[in-house]
Image (tube, rainbow, N blue to C red):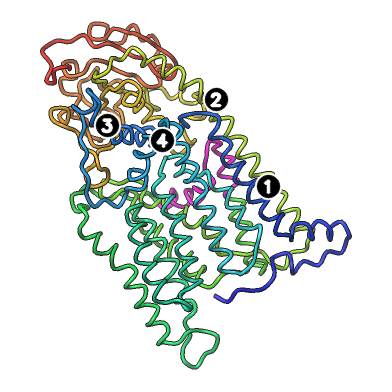
Amino acid sequence: MTPNSGTIVADWRPTASLDRRIIALLATRAAWWSACGATALILLFPLFLVDVPPLLDYPNHLARMHVLAFGEHDAFLSRMYEQHWSIIPNLAIDLVMPAMLKVMPIYVAGRIVLAATLLLPLIGVLVYHRVAFGVRSYWPLAAALTAYNSLFLFGFMNFLLALGMALLVAAAWLRWRDRHPIWITAFGALATVAIFFMHLFGLVFLAVLLGSEELANFRWPNQTNGVSWSALLRRAAMGVIAFAPPVVLYFLAPLNELGGEMTFRPLWHKLYSLVEPFMVYDGAWDVLTGGVFLAGIYLACRFRHMRIAPGTTLALLVLFVAYLCSPFVMKQTGFIDARFPIMLGLLLFAGLLPVTLPPRVSLIIGGVLALLFLARTASLAEVWYDHNRDLADFRRVIAAVEPGSRVLVVDVDETDAPDYWTTVPRGRHIPYFMRLDYHLPALLTIERHAFFPYLFTVAAKQPLTVRPPFDKIAIPEGLPPSWQSLVVGHRVHSDVPTPYLDNWQSNFDYVLLLNAGGGGDLSAYLPDRLALLATADVAALFRIRPLIPPLIPKP
């Protein structure tokens, strides 16, 4: 990469004095850094509105952090769980948060990690863009539009942190690979190990970024302005050395223990999901925003108003093909293919630079993007603030659960009550895409020191396992069954195994019903087996009337 001097605004030729003054102001370093600071503050604002944001996996991750930090010394949790550390490529928050919990409340530590999850990819985009083009540009700041995306709402913190780290490492590698090849190779080896333990997809992203850049800069010997065969081979050797440690770690990791079948999404679903970087809680508006934005990028490239960094075109193509070919589920891990649209979205901001636009048009586009960013963040902030009502009701409902209790979680899902699900609060789902409230029962572990069946404890993915005999009424990951499952005696609406439904009346103390507002008159729900204790729209709690001596004696 050959940096260009100046900034993006250096090529603008304003014809009006007002345009000239605005552009001169924007061209200053102080203005650019002020815009960065303001963007970061706006991004973080929603984190101050609620202690447990409505993110899918987030409560479950918090519960695991709580057990890792305090479980060994907790009279109840120590009987349920034990730590199980190994070479696991999914440990970013597991290595950091338990130590944080020793000095700060769990919900503060969680929001600090969420802040890092929001900011690190954005910082990576800014740094990579600066190395790629050698300019300070406002364009990569527009990546803040996608900071809150579908996978952030899923709580995929390790994945997003790894993507941000991959962009930073790629920028450092491209900046110094020629000046300091030995040092950058050593740095690369250390960095790839760090990214391996954060998340494997961070390594995939880094490999695509570096490989595409090197191939794009290669020229045949009779061509100029490119690297030769010898330079390409030297850089390839550097890359092999840098990526060798995580490759060795991969083969030492217990990933072969993960089985299960591969499933694929239909092509139309994959094309729809290309707007995942823009998906939050607003359904059709998010899809429209993403569609218009992608169309605008295409038109800008088509009419040569976008400069593309070397390797970016190839990287986009590789990621897009990988997305189309990747399964949705593989090795007991879901949303495999959904990771690629997020990488594509980041690269659109990191590897592109608007050029040759009339200054007034540039200012208008910048203003529209800024207003869109403010509107999207305000909409999300409203959802998070409103989620406090669900949290307060949920905590009131579970307040009767005694420490050490075993709580069976069931759910009134979309199939059970379709009309109800058209009116639920926005924080409970991404419209037309995914539910987000499945793991709210993890607060039972944090706040009530109680057991629920599906805390994340996959041995090859998390450093935590369930102790016997609790393992007989647990699954390492999953979702709650329909409340109808307790009536018919087996799981309905899903093929996910739930062995703990056998003899549930004997082996659990309580039943927690999610989305109880869709269940109608709950006093009539299995009255011979359950006693209703507390109810709200978000959940209801029942005490189980035991039949026979339980499999697991209560402490």
**Residue topped by disc 1:** 370
User: How far across and down, in percent of the image, does residue 235 sit?
Assistant: 40, 78
The front one of 424 and 69 is 69
**Residue topped by disc 2:** 386
**Residue topped by disc 3:** 454
Amino acid type at mark 4: Leu
> Where 303 falls versus 393 (above or below)?
below
| Residue 519, quarter of picture | top left
| Residue 340, quarter of picture | bottom left
User: How far across and down, in percent of the image, does residue 74 sit?
Assistant: 25, 26
Q: Would you say 3 lies left or right of 79 here?
A: right
> Where 118 falls versus 442 (above or below)?
below
Marks 2/1: CA distance? Answer: 24 Å
The front one of 453 and 170 is 170
Q: What residue lies at 55% left-to-right and 29% top-to-bottom? A: 49
> Where 380 falls versus 5 (above or below)?
above
Amino acid type at mark 2: Asp
Q: Would you say 494 lies left or right of 25 here?
A: left
Say which element carries label 2.
helix
Asked if labels 1 and 2 touch by Cβ distance under 8 angstroms, the answer is: no
Amino acid type at mark 3: Tyr
What residue occupies the far bottom of the structure in this picture?
Answer: 222
User: How far across and down, in percent of the image, does residue 75 sit?
Assistant: 22, 23
User: How far across and down, in percent of the image, does residue 128 sit?
Assistant: 53, 63
